Amino acid sequence: MLSHGFVVDEKGQKMSKSLGNVIDPEEIISKFGADVLRLWVVSSDFTKEVKVSIAILEKVQENYQKIRNTLRFILGNLTNLSPEIKGEKDLEKNLNLVDYYILHQLEKLVKESENNYLKYNFTPIYSSLLNFCINDLSSFYLDISKDSLYCDPISSPRRKQIITTFYYLLKGLLKVISPILPYLAEEVYQSIPFQFGFAGQESVYLANFSFTIDFPNDFEKKLEIINHFFFPLRQDIFQALEKARQEKIIAANNQAKLTISLKKKQPLDYSELNLTELLGVAELKFQEKTEDKMQEEFLCFIYVEKTEKERCLRCRS
């Protein structure tokens, strides 16, 4: 049995007609939609008094839109599948390290969400889902994938890896959101442009979302390269790039030529990482010697200058 606290206004006051602070659920649905109302419920700690107001609902609506836009981007890029992909078995088997990383994050989200649903513990599902869409996807994986998606041939190996990753991302995200955002889940499912795997059923609620991903045997070791080398280095480099933009050395990150000297010899083999692509810069090189012109960061010393390479006419920024 579940019980919940009173629904109160944003000041914590009991709702009453005399105070004029009553919010009609039908008006909320009319203005924001039923999914936003449901998302507000799962974002609230129902074991205590639950606050609601138009301002609170508007914030929830913003977060709903972020989730929706993430799914829209993934779905939109699945419309142009390579002609040889006619079933799940035709998807790319060998993925890039960052592809495996994001699928590992997705797998954690799915498993944690399943456990929390069983415990009626909805708030962590909401916060984890939102964090995954904003930080793991929009600010990282989707962003670094755009050049390949927009510029590479449909049958190029890298694009096929990304499309395979998008397939599993869509599958996992639909599994997570379908209990709390039924209208969005059904809308996305009915818009899927292929009819294999988890797709092709009459409804999202009839689909098979059994979720397993085959990771390489040495993936746990390779995961350390991402967590303990790439992300700390990325933070250092982004700080240096921000300073370079402020000083008008570059106008955008893709104009940057980076020279990097690590403070300590790196025990992890990062050679399979395409750092130029992952960081969105024009050029990048490592050297052992530290120079006076370099800016000191936490993990390394960095020198940022403007590349002499000409900009592609199809450049996005």
Image (cartoon, grey):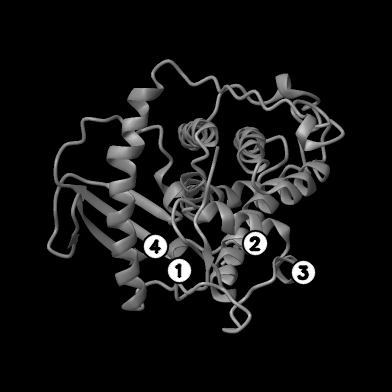
Which of marks 3 and 1 precedes in the sequence?
A: 3
Circle number at residue 314 = 2
The residue furthest top is: 217
Residue drawn 14% across the image and 46% down it: 263
Q: Is residue 233 left or right of 14 when viewed as pictured?
A: left
Q: Amino acid at mark 4?
A: Ala
Q: Which residue is mark 4?
A: 256
Quadrant in which the C terminus appears: bottom right
Q: Secondary structure at mark 2?
A: loop
Pick the front one: 267 or 215: 215
Q: Amino acid at mark 2?
A: Arg
Alpha-carbon span between mark 4 and mark 1: 7 Å
Please give the count of numbered marks on the rendered protein: 4
Q: Which residue is mark 1?
A: 252
Estimate how packed mark 2 is, as few (under 14), some (14 to 19) or many (20 or more) residues with alpha carbons within 10 Å. few
Alpha-carbon span between mark 2 and mark 1: 15 Å
215 in relation to 97, above or below: above
Q: From the top left corner, tell me how far across and down residue 107 is, in percent.
A: 51, 31
Q: Which residue is mark 3?
A: 30
Of badges 2 and 1, the one in the foreground is 1
Estimate how packed mark 4 is, as few (under 14), some (14 to 19) or many (20 or more) residues with alpha carbons within 10 Å. many
Residue drawn 17% across the image and 44% down it: 288
Q: From the top left corner, tell me how far across and down residue 272 is, in percent.
A: 40, 32
Which of marks 2 and 3 precedes in the sequence?
A: 3
Alpha-carbon span between mark 4 and mark 3: 48 Å
Which of marks 3 and 4 precedes in the sequence?
A: 3
Alpha-carbon span between mark 2 and mark 4: 18 Å
Of badges 4 and 1, the one in the foreground is 1
Estimate how packed mark 3 is, as few (under 14), some (14 to 19) or many (20 or more) residues with alpha carbons within 10 Å. few
